[in-house]
């Protein structure tokens, strides 16, 4: 199982993030994110970045294009702006979403 890294509420990161661990964002990230595992944006999190991850869960705010290998979940309190490309997309009632969705089936090595 992958390790989990947390970017805390008071942290601001500008630039590119990449890695193989699961990542939880409680603070602010601007730039690009490229992960091999699961990314969670918590309710306090604010991400202005293009995101590539295997799986993404959004509880906070995200602005930028999203490319996920397996699944994107936008929970009821989330605000998302940008285009999503993923085989499975879940948007809960109450979530705010502005963008387009392209759902396709890809092989795991396409990520």
Image: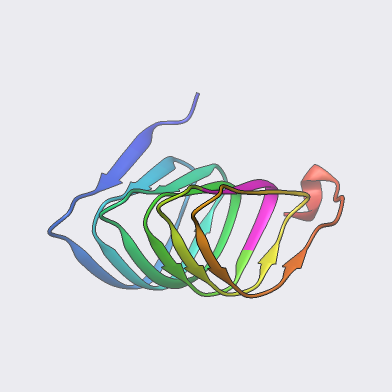
10 above or below 90?
A: below
The residue positioned farthest toward the front in the image shown:
94
Where is residue 46 drawn, in percent x and y? 32, 65
Where is residue 57 drawn, in percent x and y? 50, 46
Main secondary structure found in the magenta portion: strand
Q: Nearer the viewer, residue 94 or 23?
A: 94
In the displayed structure image, the side of residue 98 where residue 111 appears, left or right: right
The residue positioned farthest toward the left in the image shown:
10
- Numbered circles on residues, count: 0
Q: Nearer the viewer, residue 99 or 26?
A: 99
The structure residue drawn at horizontal position 79% and vertical position 48%, both measured from the top left corner, is 109
Magenta span: 67-74
Where is residue 15 drawn, in percent x and y? 35, 75
The residue positioned farthest toward the top in the image shown:
1
Here the colouring is rainbow
Q: Nearer the viewer, residue 34 or 76?
A: 76
The structure residue drawn at horizontal position 30% and vertical position 57%, both measured from the top left corner, is 45
The structure residue drawn at horizontal position 80% and vertical position 54%, both measured from the top left corner, is 110
Q: Quadrant of residue 98?
A: bottom right
In the displayed structure image, the side of residue 33 where residue 86 appears, left or right: right
Residue 1 drawn in magenta: no
In the displayed structure image, the side of residue 28 where residue 103 appears, left or right: right
Where is residue 49 drawn, in percent x and y? 45, 73
């Amino acid at each position: 199982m992958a390790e989990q890294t947390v970017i805390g509420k008071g942290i601001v990161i500008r630039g590119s993030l990449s890695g193989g661990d699961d990542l939880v964002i409680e603070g602010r990230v601007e730039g690009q994110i490229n992960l091999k595992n699961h990314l969670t944006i918590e309710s306090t999190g604010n991400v202005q970045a293009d995101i590539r991850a295997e799986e993404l869960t959004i509880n906070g705010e995200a602005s930028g294009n999203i490319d996920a290998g397996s699944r994107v979940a936008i929970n009821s309190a989330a605000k998302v702006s940008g285009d999503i490309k993923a085989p499975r997309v879940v948007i809960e009632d109450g979530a705010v979403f502005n963008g387009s969705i392209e759902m396709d089936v890809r092989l795991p090595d396409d990520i």
